[in-house]
Image (cartoon, helix red, strand yellow):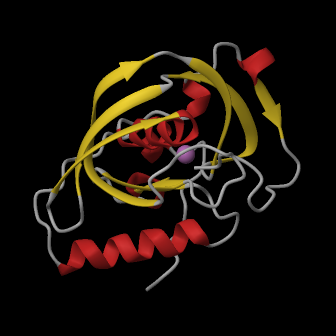
């Protein structure tokens, strides 16, 4: 396994749209293992998306089980070709991102979502989730479409916050 280099703003590649995965082979699963090792390194983000390491395929990892937010979650999820099929409610929440190391921001996301995806073996997944986990998945899927949370803040003047230190386990970094 290997820790991969994370692209950070203003790298233009973060705006690239990722392509669906069509081959579910050992090479894919080896990449997923590297992506997971990269997520767990450094500030241990709750999520990571393949394009953040320069691989423009629709793969994300989310794991909200170790955060301090007392909300239901599915634990460690590898989502290949994830697609949100239903949204309900909305709420503002603070987000961070490995690719935006110097800021956090307030972003409006759906409170509850339904999701279709595949696992790394190509098996279909259907999930319903809410709150912090739903937020994390929406954040990661945005990466697959070339969007960052800073593209979604209502006002960069009032909803972006500088941070001096990227604290380990200190937020919804993804
Ligand atoms: Ni992110």
Left or right for 152, reference 145 = right
Residue at figure coordinates x 52%, y 54% from the top left: 47
Give 151 or 47, whichever is nearer the viewer: 47
Give 86 or 166, whichever is nearer the viewer: 86
Q: What percent of the width, then of the height, locates residue 30?
A: 31, 79
Residue at figure coordinates x 55%, y 65% from the top left: 39
Q: Is residue 127 above or below residue 105?
A: below
Q: What percent of the width, then of the height, locates residue 174?
A: 57, 49
Left or right for 149, reference 147 = right
Q: Is residue 143 above or below residue 64?
A: above
Left or right for 142, reference 45 = left
Residue at figure coordinates x 64%, y 49% from the top left: 173
Q: Is residue 35 above or below residue 114?
A: below
User: How many marks on residues?
Assistant: 0
Furthest-right residue in this view:
164
Residue at figure coordinates x 56%, y 53% from the top left: 64
Q: What percent of the width, then of the height, locates residue 163?
A: 84, 43
Q: What percent of the width, then of the height, locates residue 69?
A: 68, 46
Q: Where the N terminus falls, by quadrant?
A: bottom left
Left or right for 10, reference 26 = right
* The quarter of the displayed image where residue 126 is located: top left
Q: In which quarter of the image is ligand 1?
A: top right
Furthest-left residue in this view:
22
């Amino acid at each position: 396994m290997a820790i991969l280099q994370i692209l950070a703003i203003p790298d233009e590649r973060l705006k690239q749209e990722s392509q669906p995965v069509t081959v579910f082979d050992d090479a894919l699963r080896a990449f997923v293992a590297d992506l997971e090792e990269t997520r767990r390194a450094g500030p241990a983000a709750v999520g990571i998306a393949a394009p953040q390491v320069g691989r423009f395929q629709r793969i994300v990892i989310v794991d909200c089980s170790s955060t301090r937010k007392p909300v239901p979650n599915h634990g460690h999820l590898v989502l290949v070709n994830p697609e949100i099929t239903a949204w309900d409610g909305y709420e503002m929440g603070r987000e961070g991102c490995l690719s935006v190391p110097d800021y956090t921001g307030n972003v409006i996301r759906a409170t509850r979502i339904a999701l279709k995806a595949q696992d790394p073996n190509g098996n279909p997944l259907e999930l319903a989730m809410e709150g912090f986990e739903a937020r994390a998945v929406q954040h990661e899927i945005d990466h697959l479409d070339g969007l960052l949370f800073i593209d979604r803040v209502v006002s960069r003047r009032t909803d972006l916050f500088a941070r001096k230190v990227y604290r380990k386990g200190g937020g919804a970094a993804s």
